[in-house]
Image: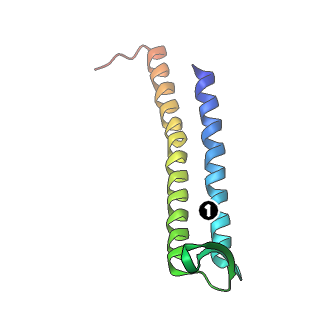
Amino acid sequence: MEAVKVDNKLRRQNIINRLFGQAEKMLDDLEGETFKTILRGEGGSEGEDVLDFIPTTDRRALIQSINTATNNAVTLEKVDADAGAEAGVNMLTALAEALGVRDA
């Protein structure tokens, strides 16, 4: 069971790193000199284009995606941060048992 916990912790850390990496890439896109996007042309055709500005809808979508990625990464970090408190409680419980302290 402990091996599964360790494995899941490593998996969460990998996901956290990847989410922050994606957020960094999107920030680079926001701050870049050019922006690659898909534009709809005549007759509904779509084509890739490079612009010297970011269209408002694309800018909004990038900012929302950055927010989502970083919030999810922080939420996952909290999962493992709580493990430290649990370890402290377990240590104090073991110490109390060793000293013969009983629940009041």
The colour scheme of the drawn protein is rainbow
Rendered residue at 66%/78% (across/down) = 31
* Foreground pick, 90 / 40: 40
In which quadrant of the rendered image does the N terminus lie? top right
Quadrant location, the C terminus: top left
Q: Nearer the viewer, residue 55 or 31?
A: 55
Q: Position of residue 32 (x, y in %)?
A: 70, 78
Location of residue 52 with respect to 43 vertically, above or below = below
Is residue 93 or residue 67 the one in the foreground? Answer: 67
Task: Determine whether 32 is above or below 72 in the image.
Answer: below
Relative image position of residue 23 (x, y in whole percent) = 61, 62
> In which quarter of the view is residue 38 placed?
bottom right
Closer-to-camera residue (83/41): 41
Q: Residues within 10 Å of mark 1 (few under 14, many from 20)?
A: many
Say which amino acid is labelled 1: Ala
Instruction: Determine whether, in the image, residue 96 is placed left or right of residue 32.
Output: left
Count of numbered tags: 1
Tell me the residue at 58%/28% (across/down): 5
Q: Is residue 41 above or below residue 25?
A: below
What residue is at 32 percent from the left and 19 percent from the top? 103
Q: Which residue is drawn at the image coordinates 46% and 16% (left, top)? A: 99
**SS class of the residue under badge 1?**
helix
Furthest toward the front, the residue is 43
Q: Which residue is mark 1?
A: 23
Q: Position of residue 39 (x, y in %)?
A: 60, 76
Q: Residue furthest bottom?
A: 52
Quarter of the view holding residue 11: top right
Is residue 76 positioned above or below 63 on the image? above
Indicate the quadrant where residue 21 lies: bottom right
Single out the residue that lies furthest toward the left: 104
